[in-house]
Image (cartoon, helix red, strand yellow):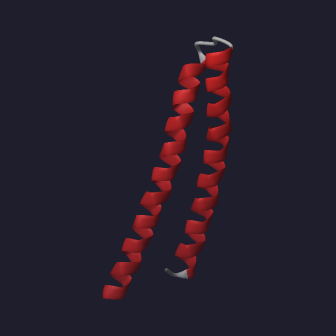
Amino acid sequence: MSNDAALMQKKRLTTMFAIDAVCFVLAGAAIIGHVAFKQGWLMPVFLVSIAVGLGAQIWFILGWMKAAKAEEEGKAS
């Protein structure tokens, strides 16, 4: 992987970790609030935070696959 692609993936990884950390804390607080304090409106917050965290991981993996494919095409030329 070239230096530019590696730097981009490192930024993507850091961004994914930050998003996942925020989503993890938010999902934990939302499920505790929903179950312990019977706040029904927190269930959608829990579900959305799980979906966003999963989306961040998919975004990272797709970027990694794109970079690997571009590198592979560069080697073939």
The location of residue 22, given as percent across then percent down, is 67, 41
Q: Nearer the viewer, residue 75 or 58?
A: 58
Residue 12 shown left or right of residue 75 in the figure: right
Residue at x 57%, y 28% (from the top left corner) = 46
The location of residue 74, given as percent across then percent down, is 37, 83
Q: Nearer the viewer, residue 53 or 34?
A: 34
Quarter assignment of residue 75: bottom left
Picture layout, residue 52 above or below residue 7: above
Picture layout, residue 71 above or below residue 21: below
Residue at x 52%, y 29% (from the top left corner) = 47
The residue positioned farthest toward the front in the image shown: 36
Q: Quadrant of the C terminus?
A: bottom left
Total numbered labels placed on residues in the image: 0
The location of residue 66, given as percent across then percent down, is 40, 66
Quarter assignment of residue 69: bottom left
The location of residue 36, given as percent across then percent down, is 67, 16
Picture layout, residue 55 above or below residue 26: below
Residue at x 52%, y 81% (from the top left corner) = 2
Picture layout, residue 30 above or below residue 76: above
Residue 57 shown left or right of residue 36 in the figure: left
The residue positioned farthest toward the left in the image shown: 76
